[in-house]
Amino acid sequence: GENVEQHPSTLSVQEGDSAVIKCTYSDSASNYFPWYKQELGKGPQLIIDIRSNVGEKKDQRIAVTLNKTAKHFSLHITETQPEDSAVYFCAASIGRGFKTIFGAGTRLFVKA
Amino acid sequence: EAGVTQFPSHSVIEKGQTVTLRCDPISGHDNLYWYRRVMGKEIKFLLHFVKESKQDESGMPNNRFLAERTGGTYSTLKVQPAELEDSGVYFCASSKRENTGELFFGEGSRLTVL
């Protein structure tokens, strides 16, 4: 069945450093790749997404890259801040995203 | 605009008991989803409603789980009888009819089965 693998499961960085989270997906028909951030006590919230017709997308300090051939996509956070500490989930879906498959999450710690 | 709300936030029950979780989606969102995250694992799809109709329930684990969305507004997810492996955080999410892919999540209902 559809599967999304996410690495690493835990990531600790110093404030100001960059953080990279990587995901792979199994279903080559997937064409929508969102990233969600879950802060303590809250539900996951969309922070950025990318569609299969684009290789890279950037929004201020966060960027996503997509390699459809290798079925890899990544989240890059630059100049990390303590408030970036959270659990990040990558996901993949087909079409309009009615069934979204999530990775297992990466717990990011940003040390001040 | 109110977000997705879930109740209860935390429920502790004994094996064999029944629990009902409730989700109120964002007003006007036709699509409603239930997901579950078991300790440290992926957020796993359970099912999808479009208004009151079950569009996809391929992720429901077994017949101990029953989801309803009468009237196409709020939804309930009942687990009867609960087993130890049902413990986890149950998330509800909603999206607009013209779904762009973004899911709006509630804060989750943590279920602990002892």
Image: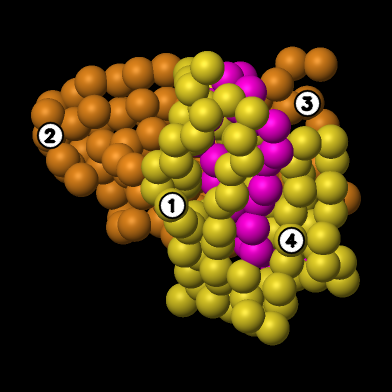
Where residue B106 sits in the image (x, y, percent)?
Answer: 58, 27
On the image, numbered disc 1 is attached to which residue?
Answer: A8
Tell me the kind of residue under disc 3.
Ser
Q: Residue A54: percent from the left, percent from the top?
A: 86, 66
> Mark 2 = which residue?
B15
User: Which chain letter goes with mark 2?
Assistant: B
- Mark 4 neighbour density, 10 Å: few (under 14) some (14–19) many (20 or more): some
- Which chain is home to disc 4? A
Q: Tell me the residue that label 3 is attached to.
A: B27
Q: What amino acid does circle 1 point to?
A: Pro
Q: Nearer the viewer, mark 3 or mark 4?
A: 4
Q: Mark 4 touching mark 1, by CB under 8 A?
A: no
| Res. A4 visible in picture | yes
Q: Earlier in the sequence, mark 4 or mark 1?
A: 1
Disc 3 residue crowd, few under 14, some 14–19, many 20+, Cα 10 Å: some
Rendered colour, chain B: orange
Which chain corresponds to the colour yellow?
Answer: A
> CA–CA distance between discs 2 and 3?
35 Å
Marks 3 & 1, CB-CB < 8 Å contact: no
Name the residue tied to disc 4.
A65
Residues at marks 1 and 2 on the same chain: no
Q: Depth check: give the residue in front, B43 or B49.
A: B43
- Label 2 vs 3, first from the N-terminus: 2
